[in-house]
């Protein structure tokens, strides 16, 4: 068992997301925001400006005309998209070269994060759900808890993997051995990063969508839970927990998705996942 | 020696004896590994989904995404290199599943069922296989020797 204070100090020691990305995600949720507000946040940040133009002109969006200014990018992509691109650009550099405990390298963790972001969004479209706000970004950041508790998982990996081989889901094994799992820690990271509450809730409940308390955006949690399972099933960023997970019966029922449609989403998303993942390389500095 | 990596929804064929063909992180996806010891040719596909009818347009661009369009392509490519069906040694790995799968996410099982039907219809025998279970696999084929291995949960075994 790890003392909560030890986990908190680890969470606080994590590098944080860039302020501009966070400001944009706040602006994207505020209906009074205008394109001009976005430009004011983006322009002073040369790296974000460059990333935004690069992404706007990439195959991922497949635009006909070349986007050459921040203003144009915001107009063409829309405010939500711009805030998603900013989140992706901000998240990639904080991923360490290798996540201890999960036996996964930065590039695979990044691929998995992007896969869950894209699959969550495409599932929402396939199911004709009103697209919950922040679907892409919530999917992208669902595993942030792993950045903070990897070292503890690594120290107890024999115990945890023993339980996984015995049939326990990886997150449940974490909880049994450490007293906490990466989902619960993910909510602490979301708080420390001052992410919107909905994203913290997705990080917190993405392995237990049947248990979400009142007031949490359950459809969003369901989408990310299903997308996470699908990404792992397809081998998009396999980590040591691999396929040791269950799909919550409630999620299947609530989403009402059929296998064929799931396969269609998987087939239609693969290229987009690769394109988006290739746009930002995780820095992978060995911390 | 070169290492040829087979991405998801891709296949590779080589007639160079010192080549190694490898594919990583097979979850519910399946790798079909084919070796011709007579012509010394090796091939591997890493397909993701059972049937192209779910996305016919996608199948035109990426036939190796689906069992029904990808596997025939792998065999035809080997035949073009002079391989004969009677000499081919066929092995299969992957088709894993999540825990307690009630069917929705059993892409691995459907991937395997379609493969068995196709092989049954065209009289292809599977020499060895390592399929199913909640695990991810990496497979390697040495083109020269035909040595085929599966690595899963830190252990490498010969297939």
Image: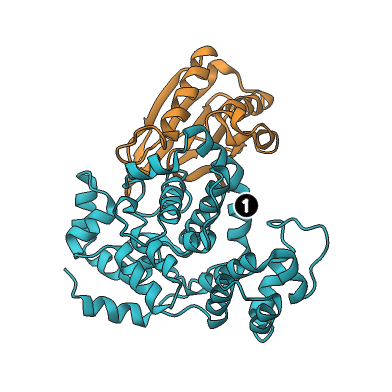
In the image, residue A194 above or below residue A167: below
Name the foreground residue: A226 vs B51. Answer: A226
> The numbered mark 1 sits on a residue in which chain?
A
Image-based side of A151 in relation to A272, left or right? left
Name the residue: 66% across, 80% down.
Answer: A37
Tell me residue A108's x, y (percent): 47, 58
Q: Quick one: SS at disc 1?
A: helix
Asked if residue A190 shows in the view, the reply is yes
* Label 1 crowd bin: few (<14), some (14–19), many (20+), radius 10 Å: some
Q: Could you tell me which quadrant the N terminus of chain A lies in?
A: bottom left
State which quadrant residue A177 falls in.
bottom left
Q: In the image, what residue occupies the spot 53% across and 36% down?
A: A261
Tell me which colouring the rendered structure shows: by chain
The answer to whether residue B47 is visible is: no
Q: Is residue A87 above or below residue B104?
A: below
* Residue drawn at point x = 38 percent, y = 76 percent: A191
Q: Is residue A11 left or right of residue B120?
A: left
Nearest the camera: B92 or B99?
B99
The orange one among the chains is B
Question: Residue A222's spot in the image, x, y percent?
Answer: 41, 51
Count of picture labels = 1
Residue extending farthest to the right is A65
Which residue in the protein does label 1 denote? A272
> What is the x, y in percent for residue B124?
50, 17
Question: In the figure, is residue A26 to the left or right of A279?
Answer: left
Q: Nearer the viewer, residue B152 or B81?
A: B152
Q: Colour of chain A?
A: cyan
Q: Quadrant of the C terminus of chain A?
A: bottom left
Q: Is residue A229 above or below residue A11?
A: above
Residue at 56%, 33% in the rendered image: B43
Q: How far across and down, in percent of the image, does residue A255 sit?
A: 44, 43
- Looking at the image, residue A164 lies above or below residue A45: above
């Amino acid at each position: 068992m790890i003392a909560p204070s030890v986990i908190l100090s680890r969470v606080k020691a994590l590098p944080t997301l860039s302020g501009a990305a966070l400001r944009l995600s706040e602006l994207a949720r505020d209906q009074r925001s205008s394109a001009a507000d976005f430009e004011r946040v983006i322009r002073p940040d040369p790296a974000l400006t460059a990333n935004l133009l690069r992404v706007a002109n990439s195959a991922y969006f497949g635009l006909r005309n070349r986007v050459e200014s921040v203003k144009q990018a915001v107009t063409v992509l829309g405010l939500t998209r711009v805030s998603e691109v900013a989140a992706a650009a901000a998240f990639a550099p904080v991923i360490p070269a290798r996540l201890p405990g999960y036996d996964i390298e930065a590039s695979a963790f990044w691929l998995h994060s992007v896969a869950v972001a894209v699959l969550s969004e495409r599932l929402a479209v396939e199911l004709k759900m009103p697209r919950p706000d922040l679907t892409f970004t919530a999917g992208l950041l669902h595993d942030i808890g792993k950045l903070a508790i990897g070292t503890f998982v690594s120290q107890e990996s024999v115990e945890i993997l023993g339980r996984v081989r015995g049939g326990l889901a990886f997150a449940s094994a974490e909880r049994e051995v450490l007293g906490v799992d990466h989902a619960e820690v993910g909510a602490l990271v979301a708080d420390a990063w001052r992410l919107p509450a909905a994203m913290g809730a997705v990080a917190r409940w993405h392995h237990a969508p049947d248990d979400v308390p009142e007031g949490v955006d359950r459809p969003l949690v369901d989408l990310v839970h299903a997308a996470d399972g699908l990404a792992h099933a397809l081998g998009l960023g396999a980590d040591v927990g691999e396929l040791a997970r269950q799909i919550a019966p409630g999620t299947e029922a609530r989403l009402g998705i059929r296998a064929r449609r799931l396969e269609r989403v998987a087939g239609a998303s693969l290229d987009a996942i690769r394109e988006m993942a290739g746009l930002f390389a995780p820095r992978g500095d060995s911390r | 020696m070169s290492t040829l990596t087979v991405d998801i929804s891709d296949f590779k064929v080589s007639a160079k004896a010192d080549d190694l063909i490898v594919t990583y992180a097979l979850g519910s996806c399946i790798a079909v590994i084919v070796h011709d010891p007579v012509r010394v040719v090796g091939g591997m596909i890493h397909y993701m989904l059972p049937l192209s009818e779910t996305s016919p347009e996608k199948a035109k661009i990426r036939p190796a995404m689906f069992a029904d369009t990808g596997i025939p392509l792998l065999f035809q490519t080997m035949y073009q290199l002079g391989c004969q069906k009677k000499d081919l040694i066929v092995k299969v790995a992957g088709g894993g599943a999540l825990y307690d799968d009630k069917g929705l996410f059993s892409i691995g099982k459907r991937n395997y069922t379609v493969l068995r039907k196709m092989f049954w219809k065209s009289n292809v025998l599977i020499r060895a296989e390592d399929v199913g279970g909640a695990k991810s696999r990496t497979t390697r084929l040495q083109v020269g020797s035909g040595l085929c291995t599966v690595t899963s949960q830190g252990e490498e075994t010969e297939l």
